Image (cartoon, rainbow, N blue to C red):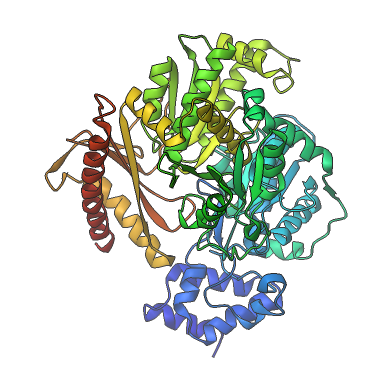
Amino acid sequence: MTQTDPIQSAVSEGKLMASAASNINAYLAAKLPDWAQSSIRELVGKAAWSELNDRFYRELEFGTGGIRGRTIATVATAAETGTPGPYGMPEHAAVGSNMLNDFTLTRAVMGLFNYTKGYLDGRGDAAKPRLVIAHDVRFFSRYFCELAASVWTRLGGEAFIFDGPRPTPQLSFAVRHLRAHAGAVITASHNPPHDNGFKAYFIDGGQVVPPHDTGIVARVAAVPLGAVSGYAKKDLAGVTTLGREIDDAYLAVAALAVVDGDMLRNAHLKVVYSNLHGTGAVHSVPLLIHAGCNVIEVAEQMSLDPRFPTVKSPNPENAEALSIAVKVANARGCDVVMATDPDCDRMGVAVRGRSGAMELLTGNQIGSLIAEYRLIKYKERGWIPKAGSPRACIIKTFVTTQLQDAIGRGHGVKVIDTLTGFKWIAAKIGVYEERLRKAMGPGWDYDATPFAERARLLQEHSTFYVFGTEESYGYLPNDYVRDKDGNAACLMFAELCAWVAGKGMTVPEYLDQVYLKYGFYLEDTINIYYEGASGSEKIKRILDTYRTGRPASFGDVTVTGFQDFGRERILDADGEEIPKQDLYVVTLSNGYRFAARGSGTEPKMKFYLFASDKVAGAQELPAVKARVRAELDRLKLLIEADARRRAEG
């Protein structure tokens, strides 16, 4: 009996998907290392068809965060486990076309190189393609970083890596600072420990967007699996390891997040900080200390540990992830807790209310507070006119709170909505940059122009980016970096806290002041997880049936509006067309709204719920909050139940 017989039989019996069988046979036919071949044969021999389906039913695709997937399998083979390394890391990453491993990573790097080389050739640029790579603390992150650098240089390019883990925003900065042509971060953000990822950046320092993302995908797909075997062994002879100067340059730029440095220094703010075992330990603490804060670290979470042992999930959105930090804050008499995720592009907080209890803020609330504060301060500094300007803007995603739309209107600045994913915010910043470059002509240096002067010129010739945020705890203070920045976010929130304390208020009290000014806004989310190949089909079923059988009502609340971003022509506030995406925005008869989309980075269906109501005065606010909360909770149950019915068909 040949090795393929049981595979063919499993397909015939409905145990193995045809796409999985095709990918398995391709892996068996390729000249891959012995450990990879034996791993597949072991799983076939054990008839582990469910595991093989999950590993091979598709090839990893670029989503909103690039390529992301499991690197440690649910069912590990003996060859993969081998001799475990530090923290119990298997000897090899799990084999599979749907896994992040040596082979999928190498194909991604080869595709990125080929696309970048073609891009440079098309511009008549004879430079060697230059790539900067950073990595977080996850299993295989350093190995993947070095392997990617090795592949790139052996293909004929220049590769730069850091001497250890570094945050994602520093990579974005380094691409621009080193005038590289592309960048990559080996990270899975706040995903579970078994995941890792390859997040691709292009020449502007932002994550890849059309047409580059689809171009890279095509180039990756064109790389034969057999071609990766020649790059299996790392060769770092031609790779450059970056020194201290790149850290200093990034720290100098991150520090520019502070608007009123004297005020923050004089406040002597006490901050409890946790890096949740990730890269935030590298820069967030020194930045806060240099800004004048008294930083108390959560000692048991400062280790760079890929298991994230003290939390269920290393996600600062979750209350549980901040629980140890909150205990430290209570013991040490601190009013502010901040935490960043493993690659330090997201930040979550807890603040003390007037009652003395610590309260967690949502990403929507944090972003709204920072937006309001920075617009006030920018006007005080004269960086934007006191009446506002249509040539100044804040940028957010369609799934971020409309409170920020109200704040923008209140300050007389433009609010730009983008698709989900910070790469779209960065792309919009790039449009404004390019417009100014054209106005200023050849030889003018955008990056070397001081901030205040750049703000003036952008408002004269283009649009000045004031602040950007997304609901999933991502914030960016200026355009020196082109991705959300957890380090800079810590500084911005510390400054906000110092300013609010100077007014004799708590942060929750100030948030209520914002509600009284603009109206009460409340948001919530529904996350429905569907793992593996069968889960992917369920998510697709929800998305497809929303298009073919739009919801008409949820209980006694009818649907009054339905936007299909995958089919309709939708324009942003600049009159520019939004790229097509499977995103639906539903408006309800009570004025509430929700958005539905499949996650680009995790196996889940996401719903974003938005509610609001007017507030006549402070006395009425508690009742308004309770009423809106109750109605949103009721609708949440109905929307989720409908989605689960659609998933099952």
Image coords of residue 216 (percent x, y): 60, 45
- Image quarter for residue 423? top right
The residue at 61%/79% (across/down) is: 39
Q: Position of residue 403 (x, y in %)?
A: 37, 30
Determine which quarter of the picture holds residue 319.
bottom left
| Residue 133, horizontal then vertical, whole percent | 72, 48
Relative to 402, is 442 above or below?
Answer: above
Looking at this view, is 126 or 511 the one in front?
511
- Taking the image as shown, residue 3 lies to the left or right of residue 406, namely right
Q: Is residue 332 above or below residue 451?
A: below
Asked if residue 504 is positioned above or below residue 174 in the image, the reply reads above
Question: 573 above or below 277?
Answer: above
Q: Is residue 256 visible to the viewer in this orientation of the structure?
A: yes
**Residue 192: % across, % down:** 53, 62
Residue lying at the far left of the rendered structure: 556
Image quarter where the C terminus lies is bottom left
For residue 446, side relative to residue 214 (left or right): right
Q: Is residue 179 visible?
A: no
Q: Residue furthest right?
A: 237
Quadrant containing the N terminus is: bottom right
- How many numbered callouts? 0
Answer left or right for 468 relative to 104.
left
**Residue under the point 70% across and 78% down:** 34
Q: What residue appears at the point 53 percent right and 55 percent down from the top-left corner?
A: 327
User: As rendered, which of 509 and 23 lies closer to the eye?
Assistant: 509
The one nearer the camera, 479 or 371, is: 371
Residue 597 vs residue 382: left or right? left
